[in-house]
Amino acid sequence: MTNRRNDSPGPDEDHWYVNLVVCTAGSFTTIVAMTLLLPFLPLYVEEIGVRGHAAIVQWSGVAYGATFFTAALTAPIWGRLGDRYGRKLMLIRASLGMAIAMSLTGMAEDVWQLVAVRLLTGLLGGYASGSMILVAAQTPRAKSGWALGVLSSGIMAGNLVGPLIGGALPPLIGIRATFWLSGATIFVSFLGTVFWLREIPRQPQARKSKLGGLWARIADKRPVVAMLATGLLFTFALTSIEPIITVYVALFAPPSQVTFVAGLAMSAVALGGILSSARLGQIADRVGHWRIVVLSLAAAALLLVPQALVVSGWQLVLLRFLMGAALGGLMPGMASVIRHNAPEAIAGSLLGWSVSAQYVGQVVGPLAGGFVGGHVGMRAVFLSTAVLMAAGALANFAIERAVRATPR
């Protein structure tokens, strides 16, 4: 089931740790750059000429979602090109492309230019997902869970720190200068990628994978299909609450504390994931990555139920933190399961598809959460998401047992 010929980390096996440091730092800076605009995006949209509250909100949503739209479309392509031409080359492309795109964002003169540059950012980006692919493929198998957990912590830290920096910097240096500074920071990551990242040479046949034969080269497709579905479910669960969080908090928090508590509730998920990812990845290296995926989904399902019943802000914040800690094992777990159940030559392509599935969940989650919250009730968002997570846990458990029982 697993291709072991290309699994060895190669003659330069000690360099995997340096690669991990470079990839984690680069992923952190690029994610910060992608999320720091959240607090001031409506202000920037207004600054470049959009008038009217409804139009500002609408264009802010379009501009923010544009990046994830093109990223979802291109992630499998970059993964396949990485398999063919080298993953380091893809990280060089992504870091340089994002440095340019972020700098151009600070030069937009109207909203159409802003949306175009945001589309370009998703098209040229993908450093974090590319890092996940390189680390998964280049790290020794016994350390892969821990390494992917560290990398996941860096990615989630970027999601946590980005909005905080975005709230602090514009009043000090201005909105446009904030984009230019983020572009310069990513350029430093580009230099680190060029000079410090080292990719282990791969066998010639690893460069000849074709998309048409991708699935045919997987001995057992069930683990990969399960992880693609789990990736979509993961981001769906994280984002389904976003459209209703502020309104939901207003049901039980004092009016003066609504936005503060809502912000804490959203940040608590990332903080929980940061603290748990590396440890859960380390545990997964011992007990099995798929087992951690099942347990993470089950724990998240259980923690979603009381979120629908909270009566105070601190209860919601605590439960969101625990849910983030539970989900911290999913990203490294999914990448490890894919890597262990597919030939190394096509691992990049498959992990690229996994990233696309996660982006789809990031789009569908808020849409579904807003619809259910508006038509059924806000508490129903938590309960329905809990049902989906529980179903995902049961499905993964059943598939994992079936795969284990299959003669090899």
Image (spheres, rainbow, N blue to C red):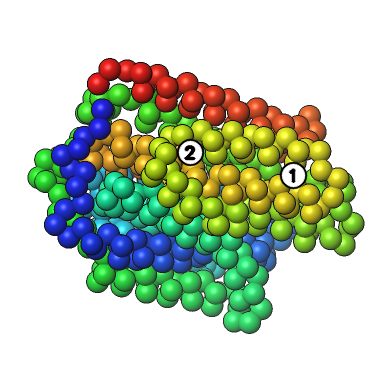
- Left or right of 178? Residue 4 is left
Report whether 223 appears left or right of 263: left
Residue 87 picture location, percent across and down: 26, 53
Task: Give the quarter of the figure containing the C terminus.
Answer: top left
> Label 2's element?
helix
Position of the N terminus by quadrant: top left
| Mark with earlier residue (2, 1) | 1
Residue at the farthest right position: 254
How far apart are the two marked residues, 2 and 1, measured between alpha carbons?
29 Å
Query: In the displayed image of the protein, which residue is found farthest to the left?
Result: 204
- The spot of residue 154 in percent (x, y) is 47, 60
Q: Give the number of the mark in front: 2 or 1.
A: 2
Relative to 261, say whether 212 is above or below: above
| 291 and 110: which is toward the camera | 291
Tell me the SS state at disc 1. Answer: loop
Which residue has dot 2 on it? 292
Circle count: 2
Crowding at mark 1 (Cα within 10 Å: few <14, some 14-19, many 20+): many
Q: Position of residue 346 (x, y in %)?
A: 25, 38
* Residue 62 visible in rendering: no
Question: Does the rendering let one see residue 285?
Answer: yes
Q: Looking at the image, which residue is at 32% across and 18% down?
A: 406
Disc 1 marks a residue whose amino acid type is: Ile
Tell me the residue that label 1 is attached to: 244
Residue type of the residue flagged with mark 2: Ile
Give x and y (percent) for residue 232: 51, 36
**Residue at figure coordinates x 34%, y 66% from the top left:** 22
